[in-house]
Image: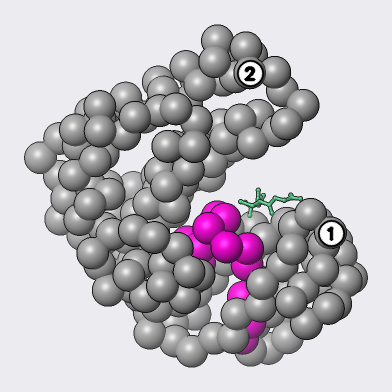
Amino acid sequence: MKLYYSKGACSLAIRIIIHEIGVTSEFEAVNLKNKTTEAGENYLLINPKGAVPALMTADNELLTENLVIQLYLAEKYKATNLLPTADNFKRYRVLEWLNYISTDVHKSFGPLFNPNVSEEMKETVFIPLLRNKLVFINDHLINKNYLLNDQFTLPDAYLFVVLRWVATFKIDLAKFENLSRYVTVLANRESIVLSLQEEGLKK
Ligand SMILES: N[C@@H](CCC(=O)N[C@@H](CS)C(=O)NCC(=O)O)C(=O)O
């Protein structure tokens, strides 16, 4: 299989999950500005949505949407530690967090990365909206190592990746005590250390 990714983008969560599971994969970088892959292919012909992540499965199916790729990998490789089976209610907690991080937290960054949104709008509207979500997660993480308390699951990889973007927008993560501790612990996790190294990123 092959993961189409962009350095430090949300596709990093899929790389982390691939390493958590211990499955082998190829990785091909995509230039999101000109939509070409590192092999010089037109990425829009591979994935007309133009976004990463996209996973070409071993069965030659191109799968998109971060949350769905994570579900696919966990179920295909029976990683029930990352996504419990349907007879275990924890599965729905994992899905609840995945959906929240995908639709509420990840998408809150959209206007912040958009150069056409004014600095004033970012500071007065969009950063406060994001900050509220960080407060909620920070409160949830009191006395917990992971979102599901003592077990690393799919949404932890995704949350780690989006929290790496926070500093870019003058939000000081150090002010969120539990989130800071959480990120520090995760940054030393083997799958994450390897993923950051492979994308040439600092902890
Ligand atoms: N709905 C997609 C969104 C993915 C997404 O926003 N990817 C960003 C990088 S984090 C991207 O590729 N943006 C460039 C673009 O959409 O042109 C998903 O959940 O996977």
In what element is the residue under mark 2? Answer: helix
Quadrant location of the C terminus in the rendered image:
bottom left
Residue at horizontal 82 percent and vertical 62 percent from the top: 35
Q: Position of residue 164 (x, y in %)?
A: 42, 47
Q: Which comes before the other along the chain, label 2 or label 1?
A: 1
Q: In the rendered image, which residue does mark 1 sit on?
A: 34
Asked whether residue 145 appears in the rendered view, the answer is yes
Residue at horizontal 45 percent and vertical 63 percent from the top: 201
Q: Position of residue 60 (x, y in %)?
A: 73, 86
What amino acid is at disc 1?
Answer: Asn
In what element is the residue under mark 1? Answer: loop
Quadrant location of the N terminus in the rendered image:
bottom right
Looking at the image, residue 9 sits to the left or right of residue 138; the answer is: right
- Compared with 19, 81 (above or below) is above
Label number found at residue 119: 2
Q: Quadrant of residue 44?
A: bottom right
Q: Position of residue 146 (x, y in %)?
A: 23, 51
Let me know if residue 3 is in the magenta part. Answer: yes
Asked whether residue 154 appears in the rendered view, the answer is no
Residue at horizontal 55 percent and vertical 10 percent from the top: 124
Q: Which residues are magenta?
A: 1-14
What amino acid is at disc 2?
Answer: Glu
Let me know if residue 90 is in the magenta part. Answer: no
Label number found at residue 136: none
Q: Quadrant of residue 43?
A: bottom right
Q: Dot 1: few (<14), some (14–19), or many (≥20) neighbours within 10 Å?
A: few
Looking at the image, residue 129 sits to the left or right of residue 92; the answer is: right
Q: Dot 2: few (<14), some (14–19), or many (≥20) neighbours within 10 Å?
A: few
Looking at the image, residue 15 sits to the left or right of residue 110; the answer is: left
Which of these two is toward me, 21 or 114?
114
